[in-house]
Amino acid sequence: LFIENHEELTMREFMLRNLQVIFEKYQSIPVEIFLEPFIKQIKISESKSYLVNIFDMEFINVAVRHRKLKVTIGLELFDLLAKTKLNSYSFSVFATEAMEVLIERFLG
């Protein structure tokens, strides 16, 4: 539902905010189950039908701090965040913060 209707901003925000709460509360959930298709959808639809929004960046900032985040998904997130930082002045602060968390976690 989330992937097929990503252009519906209110539904996407509702789902991401709820997932954000779940990811913060339950650190045993394997986050890659959701993050893999989420990242793929953003990359495929970037600037066409999927415009990154503030709640997307807030969700990513929670996801990078999740205990179960694996290196492979972390690298994909880092790539996405680097592109966001370079292409969007509005979200560069969010992207930088999340990138710093990833660097600290995996190289730290």
Image: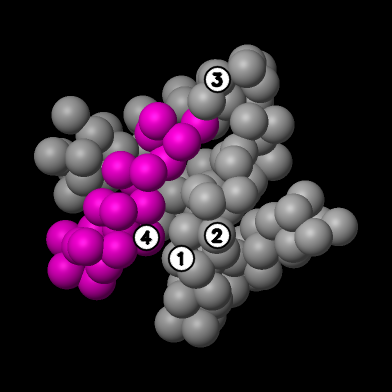
Q: Position of residue 34 (x, y in %)?
A: 39, 33
Labels 3 & 1 near each other (Cβ < 8 A): no
Q: Earlier in the sequence, mark 1 or mark 2?
A: 2
Number of numbered markers: 4
Which residue does the numbered mark 3 point to in the structure image?
Answer: 29
Label 4, label 1: how far apart the Cα atoms are: 11 Å
Quadrant location of the N terminus in the rendered image: top left
Give the magenta part as a residue range.
Answer: 31-52
Q: Nearer the viewer, residue 102 or 96?
A: 102
Q: Earlier in the sequence, mark 3 or mark 4?
A: 3
Q: Mark 1: which amino acid?
A: Leu
Identify the element where label 3 is drawn: loop
Q: Nearer the viewer, mark 2 or mark 4?
A: 2
Q: Mark 3: which amino acid?
A: Ile
Q: Which residue is found at the position 26% from the left and 67% from the top?
A: 46
Which residue does the numbered mark 2 point to in the structure image?
Answer: 75
Q: Nearer the viewer, mark 3 or mark 4?
A: 3
- Residue most extreme to the right: 108
Q: Nearer the viewer, mark 4 or mark 1?
A: 1
